[in-house]
Amino acid sequence: MSSHSDECDVLVIGAGAGGAAASLRLAQLGVRVVCLEQGDWISRDQLPKAHPDWEVRARRYWNPNPIRRRWRWDYPVKNLGANPIDTYFYNAVGGSTIGFGGIYWRFQPSDFRTKTLDSFGVDWPIRYRDLAPYYRMNELNLGVSGLAGDPVAPPREDLPLPPVAMAKLGGMWARAFIKLGWMWWVQECAISTRAYGDDREGCQGRGFCAQGCPSRALAAADVTYWPAALKSGVELRTRARVTRLRVDGRAKVSSVEYLDDNGRLMSIKPAVVVVAAGGIGTPRLLLMSSSPEFPEGLANSSGLVGRNLMAHVQSLVTGRFEERTEVDHGAWGGSVATRQFYETDPRNDFVRGFTIGGHRGWSPLNTALQVAPWGAEHHAVMERHLNHEGVAYVLGDDEPEEVNRVELDYDATDEFGLPGVRTYYRLSENSRRLGAAGIRRAQELCYAAGAREVRDSGLSPVFGWHLMGTARMGSDPRTSVVSSDHRAHDISNLFIADASSLPTGSSVNPTNTIQAMALRAAERIHALRRDM
Amino acid sequence: MAFDGSAVYAALGELDDIYGALGPAYVPPGEENVEPRVLEPLAAEALEVVIGTLIPGDEHWPSAVETNAVGYIDRTLELAPSLEPLVRAATGAFTRRMPEGGSEAFGLSSMEPSERVERLRAVERELPLGFQLIKELAYEAYYRHPAVARVIADRTGFRTNVPNDGVGLAQFDEIFTMLPQPEEPLEIRGMDL
């Protein structure tokens, strides 16, 4: 069966945001690291924005939904439930960072104590101050841009790079915030605004960041962490599909099996395993690794592997303006945002809150598909909308619920017969009310900025950009999967370093937190190495 | 009589199956079929009329017919053959609405514009998936065409080359003068917990 077997100190599974950060940090600490990634490297030529027809490419082979993209190494994902998620993730070196927008807030201190403060979700077993040094480390590693001094955030050091350019829409949003009396600040972005590191230019304003950044200003993990990790000695094996983690009689992972690109079964014996396959991929792998000792899946004595799937409460509210908004350039995630409504307000009929980001407008094909009717009115409507819009992005806190979950799907398998997944999701009542309030505020913002018309994307289907919580961290093994050391309660040499370990999701984009957690996990692994 | 496309939809399943078939079916610019290779002549002719109705030309903008959207769709169907029944059903429904005794070519070219719109609306109602597929593919072919890019820039100010070429390094400055200064320190919840 097995044609090759080798060993390493630490095996990292997944080369995305968390896996990349953990791999580098471990290597810097002198650990021998092998990383298995089921996808492959993305070449510059594959990036849609390297080509004039980038919008069509983005809908085809770059489609963020694996069901619609169907790369050879994707697995089927079926999205079910009252409010299905439109799953958004990439199996590639860099993971989903190859197609993200690079918005990089830190979580707020209250996000780590939502149960105590607001009877919402669960408390984390760690606090903001435990993660702060790792946020800093991550921001320096990537060249995060922004401005210290945000009055709604804890005091912090200056960011490595100055903020992204305002451009015209940024100024419009900022004036609207001022008019409304809302606290606001410049966005923190994983976008280099000057040359940073090797081979990374400053942002050239191409915009529409999720469709690729030919100048490497966008800090995707494949152009930031991975070059450094490889230089530090990490061995990265691509097109390597992990099939199961095997455990021995001492409840430790003894070996990891994977299929190479030709479907040959390989095996590796690590001393420690870090699973970083994302909010969908990590529970999938743990559930695939069931055994007589762990019939419900590896590390799943709590029954929570795959459960508490969170996706954030999100909507895109688009305002149309009479003036041109110059949307053809600038970071799509925009330059300014408000966290005026971030915290629980007792006057609301919901708890927790949301961020509203002032983003750019839409590109030509996307504008047409959204608003331009077929027929005689098509061109007139396009001329009124294209380059006359801006988007207010609502991102709200999503309550973890066990009913929202990831399950294996043996009826839909990948090319090697490995199971796909089914996701089940419904918005909670709190999420519906929070989301409705977020949309109302975003509409208010658009009109304050001068919009004549406003439309929104509603709350469902749910944007599956941030998939979290499915192997969460906690102090109690009955209600969590990993400990405050990122270590599985059940398996002493198994760690998780990705979005699945977040107990709550906050009201900001999670990637900075995912990577900070991964960096911390790496240091905890190193500190605990003599115990394993 | 309305066209019954239920068998076609049942065969294809849900929307994700349609988009999933499209995912690997990317057609690079210049590789659209010059002559249809999948669509039969009548279907191709009907499709051309449909496309010209979806996005007609005017004094500023070209018609979608001028962007070889038919060739784009035909090539897409070559790469994603499971979608051909949807397109065939939709074009078939469009032509079958011809009155009895139509000309050999079903009189497509002599159809009044208002009649084309009426028929296409009926197809949109009765075969929504097939209609949506054709519409989206037509929009894709249209908005990636260089002639349309020139009109976009001229009529809307959106420079379609900028996502590829950028605008150069921009600096952040004015925002510093606009940032809010709270009169009193704000409470940051959770710091002491």
Image: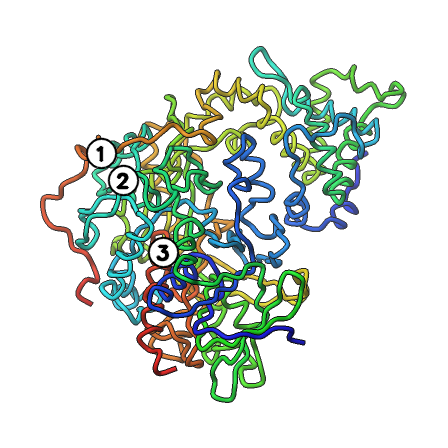
A106 sits to left or right of A157: right
Q: Nearer the viewer, mark 3 or mark 1?
A: 1
- Colour treatment of the image: rainbow
Label annotation for residue A397 = 3
Give the Cα separation between the discs numbered 3 and 1: 28 Å
Q: Position of residue A350 (x, y in %)?
A: 33, 56
Give the amino acid at mark 3: Asp
Chain letter of the residue beneath label 2 in the structure image = A
Residue under label 1, please give it.
Answer: B175
Q: Quick one: label 1, few (<14), some, or many (20+) residues within 10 Å?
A: some
On the rendered image, what quadrant is the N terminus of chain B found in?
top right
Chain letter of the residue beneath label 3 in the structure image = A
Q: Position of residue A421 (x, y in %)?
A: 59, 63
A77 sits to left or right of A336: right
Residue under label 2, please give it.
Answer: A163
Q: Quadrant of residue B71?
A: top right
Give a yes or no on whether discs 3 and 2 share a subunit: yes
Q: Nearer the viewer, mark 1 or mark 2?
A: 2
Residue A199 in view (yes/no):
yes
In this picture, is B123 found above or below A497? above
Q: Position of residue A79 (x, y in %)?
A: 57, 57
Give the Cα separation between the discs numbered 3 and 2: 25 Å
